[in-house]
Image: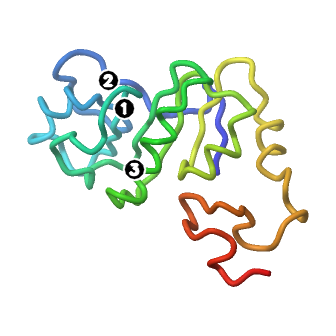
Amino acid sequence: MRILSITDDTWQRAEGAAPAPADQLLLTPAQWREVGATWPTHLAVGLLVGNDDDVQTLGFSLAPFVTIALQFPRWTDGRAYSQARLLRRRLRYTGELRAVGDVVVDVALPLARTGFDAAVLRHGESREAALRALRFFDGLLPAGNPFYQGDAQEPRPLFARGHR
């Protein structure tokens, strides 16, 4: 998983109800409904989903989006974890999932386990500490996917994978 600081993130939030096309813009579902039909296919576009949006009822294809940014208004609000899992497992979204908002070091491992590819840390969080958190269990558990319960990458529990 990629860990980014706010200053490293090249994606920008689109402004206005019908934003003008530009490369690497994050559009809300409402903005995409306004401009999606005429959006130039050569421009990278992302979707910015609020944590109270139902990703299963967006009403449009996710194929145009290079990235989907799921918002964490508070690091203790876990609804974006559920959205990520739904996007990966049920909706079969294969593009980048990124966590944005109040993203802290302590959530790096749960983000990776629920299908996120990138996290944009809130101001003041250490990128190095987040990378250490991702490697915390390396070497302590079986190779591959070591988690007993399974996760977004490997949904089968450990016993169903043939590990003893």
Could you tell whether 124 is left or right of 59 in the image?
A: right
136 in relation to 14, above or below: below
The residue depicted at 27 percent of the width and 50 percent of the height is: 62
Residue 34 horizontal/vertical position (percent)? 12, 29
**54 lies left or right of 138:** left
Going from N to C along the chain, the mark reached first, 3 or 1, is 1
Q: Amino acid at mark 1?
A: Leu
**Cα separation between marks 1 and 2:** 9 Å
What residue would you read off at disc 2? 14
- Horizontal and vertical percent position of residue 122: 64, 22
Q: According to the image, label 1 marks what residue? A: 48
Q: Secondary structure at mark 3?
A: helix
Task: Name the mark on residue 128.
Answer: none
Q: Which residue is mark 3?
A: 86
What percent of the width, then of the height, locates residue 144? 72, 72
Marks 2 and 1: in contact by CB < 8 Å?
Answer: yes
Task: Residue 157: name its quadrant.
Answer: bottom right
> Distance of mark 3 from mark 2, alpha carbons?
25 Å
- Element class at badge 2: loop
Q: Residues within 10 Å of mark 3 (few under 14, many from 20)?
A: some
Lateral position of residue 100 relative to residue 29, left or right: right
Q: Secondary structure at mark 1?
A: strand
Classify 10 Å Cα crowding around label 2: few (below 14), some (14-19), many (20 and above): many
